[in-house]
Amino acid sequence: MKLAMIGFGQAGGKIVEKFLEYDDRTGSGIVRSAVAVNTAKADLLGLERVPEENRVLIGQTRVKGHGVGADNELGAEIAEEDIDEVQSVIDNIPVHEIDAFLIIAGLGGGTGSGGSPVLAKHLKRIYTEPVYGLGILPSSDEGGIYTLNAARSFQTFVREVDNLLVFDNDAWRKTGESMESGYEEINDEIVKRFGILFGAGEVGAQGEVAESVVDSSEIVNTLDTGGVSTVGYAAEEVTDDSGGGLLSRFKSDGTSDNMDAANTTNRITSLVRKAALGRLTLPCEINGAERALLVLSGPPAELNRKGIERGRKWLEEQTGSMEVRGGDYPVSDSSYVASVILLSGVHNVPRIKELQQVAIEAQENIDEIRAESEENLEQLVEDDEDELDPLF
Ligand code: GDP
């Protein structure tokens, strides 16, 4: 499916760049337009692929291009004040050519955390195309203020978008890694998953014929539940001696063909299980997901309808949903078979409840510390007997 991607804040901008790089590498053509919005000039200058005319610096009169720190209330205010500047860039997007908007942001910071829900609300008022969010949750070691920002932004963002796809940095954190190299890897993981998912609706770009194509309308339908979504992924390298491999296709004997088909089917069903039961972008209970979409990508010879159908049935049982869609995304020159599962309308997400609890505690601490500092400052400034008078 074709998207207008808007990266809000630093993380958002970096991830949009990764999607552009992915498009270049794979020819998947999912990014119809790329926009980056920020209050920090340096972050916008650091981008390489987003066209310069699509980089919008907002809040210049308020923060002079220096960013909002981690103040997401200021981020939201600035986005509201300068929404026309963002709109004037969006005016250049050929909206009739896109299937949806995707606003990407780290929810723990200031600019993206505060600005994304404002932009989502604005776009929904103007356009009929769906507006999706890709919200990144901070890792738990980032500290209270990031968690508080994320919890508040999450609540608002979910309400304003047609669906919020969530990626949890905490579930992907590795110890002993620098933040930057850690983010590089994490961003690759994000783009791999969402690239296959959204790329599936663009079949034909490479000329392959899918057995049962995933159309962009099926992605839209799956996301139509609203609320929160998560994505699972599993992949296996295709080797010649594995079932359905390149060599075995040349065998003329029918039994081995049958065995190949059985192996291909088995591999697909096992990849579907691994994707659903392994690490999701937002860890949660898959039981109770309202809708699901299964995408199998890989060389056409390694994909078959039977495997996808079995995987789909299994997902129906696991989620309890009656609306599980499935299809393939053939990529001839790939040496991997990958299964991507979109679970839409998930409700049982302990991580969100935890995040909210930590956020409430952080809020209470912040209020306490603020009250205490006011008191301490008063004690410092005022003389004990109140004998001095201030000037005015
Ligand atoms: P903003 O510029 O004020 O919107 O804030 P940032 O985007 O710099 O950071 C917000 C949050 O996003 C951080 O607290 C991190 O959790 C996360 N983050 C920052 N950079 C990256 C990145 O490159 N990748 C990922 N996955 N998360 C990031």
Image (cartoon, helix red, strand yellow):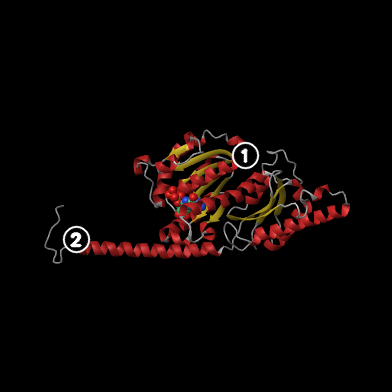
Q: Residue at x 57, y 34 (%)?
A: 94
Q: Which element carries disc 2, helix, strand or loop?
A: helix
Between 104 and 301, the one nearer to me in the picture: 301
The quarter of the rendered structure image containing the N terminus is top right
- The residue carrying pointer 1 sits among few (fewer than 14), some (14 to 19) or many (20 or more) residues within 10 Å by Cα, namely many
Q: At label 2, which amino acid type do we have?
A: Val
- The residue carrying pointer 2 sits among few (fewer than 14), some (14 to 19) or many (20 or more) residues within 10 Å by Cα, namely few
Q: Is residue 197 left or right of residue 15?
A: right
Q: Which element carries disc 1, helix, strand or loop?
A: loop
Give the vertical position of 85 relative to 265 (above or below): above
Q: Is residue 272 left or right of residue 82?
A: right
Q: At label 1, which amino acid type do we have?
A: Gly
Q: List x then y, in percent, for residue 289.
A: 64, 59
The single residue placed furthest to the left in the displayed view is 387
- Residue 212 visible to the viewer: no
Disc number for residue 29: 1
Between 321 and 202, the one nearer to me in the picture: 202
Residue topped by disc 2: 381
Give the vertical position of 343 relative to 79 (above or below): below
Q: List x then y, in percent, for residue 338.
A: 68, 52
Q: Earlier in the sequence, mark 1 or mark 2?
A: 1
- Residue 370 visible to the viewer: yes
Q: List x then y, in percent, for residue 327.
A: 72, 49
Q: Residue at x 28, y 62 (%)?
A: 373
Residue 259, picture quadrant:
bottom right
